[in-house]
Image (cartoon, grey):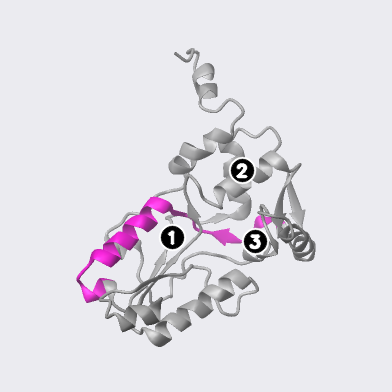
Amino acid sequence: VARIAVEHGASVMVHSSALAANPRSRSRWAASKGHGERAVRSVCPGATIVRPAHIFGPEDRFLNMFARMHQLLPRVPLVDGGERRTQPLWVGDFALALKEITLSEDPEVCLGQTYDLAGPDEYTYREIVEYVFETVRAVNHDVANVSPVFAEAVGKALSMLPNPMFTEDTFQRMMEDCILDPTADTKRLHDLRIEATSMEFPGFSFLHGYRSGSHFLDVHESGHSPS
């Protein structure tokens, strides 16, 4: 894509990568993102790279994944107790950032820049799962503390299934922090005049559907009958 953009004289080339991008990562997905950034810049030095953290939204593969795990498994598996940290990014903020970059005529915004995009708050994976438990009103709050070796073995086995809920690489990513680096010379949401959205309210707006009584449970508990 970058090569074709250069050949056709595109004024702006935006490459969507990931905050977890690292050619040396144990995660093949994260490593591929790191190699992809290098490949794009090698043919299009003026490309702008956008690195979102874990994106959450109505059809995400993050909060919804943990909610589905809770529905289908006796316990939600967490590698080494889920102590690694992440900084989830609201999908609306990500979309707005892409819009601001691609439509800008300011080279300080759209040419050769690197953006690390994340939400305002850091969470451990354990805290993420506890948030999901609370939001869906889970009866069973149990998690399974699994070792990296066991997680990789389970992930490999599940990878052979069609449309697996999680894979070996999912667990690999849960073994690494995915947060903003305060020392990195990269731009952030605030450089685009975007205020990062906290996870709590948007998360509730779609996770409540996993409750057994959904939003009608709130109406019943408040003492009012649904009309």
Q: Is residue 159 above or below residue 197?
A: below
Tell me which corner region of the image, top left, top right, bottom left or bottom right, holds residue 49. bottom left
Q: Is residue 46 visible?
A: no
91 drawn magenta: yes
What residue is drawn where x is 53% and y is 34%? 208
Q: Residues within 10 Å of mark 3 (few under 14, many from 20)?
A: some
What residue is drawn where x is 52% and y is 50%? 60
Q: Amino acid at mark 3?
A: Thr
Please give the residue where the numbered disc 2 appears in the rendered image.
67
Q: Residues within 10 Å of mark 1 (few under 14, many from 20)?
A: many
- Give the number of the mark in front: 2 or 1: 2
Q: Amino acid at mark 2?
A: Ala
Which span is picked out in magenta?
81-109
SS for callout 1: loop
SS for callout 3: helix
Q: CA distance from mark 2 to mark 3?
A: 15 Å
Q: Position of residue 66 (x, y in %)?
A: 62, 47
Please give the residue where the numbered disc 3 appears in the rendered image.
170
Q: Position of residue 73 (x, y in %)?
A: 73, 43
Q: Residues within 10 Å of mark 2 (few under 14, many from 20)?
A: many
Task: Check residue 118 in the rendering and tell me which mark sits there, or answer none.
Answer: 1
Q: CA distance from mark 1 to mark 3?
A: 19 Å
* Residue nearer the viewer, 24 or 131: 24
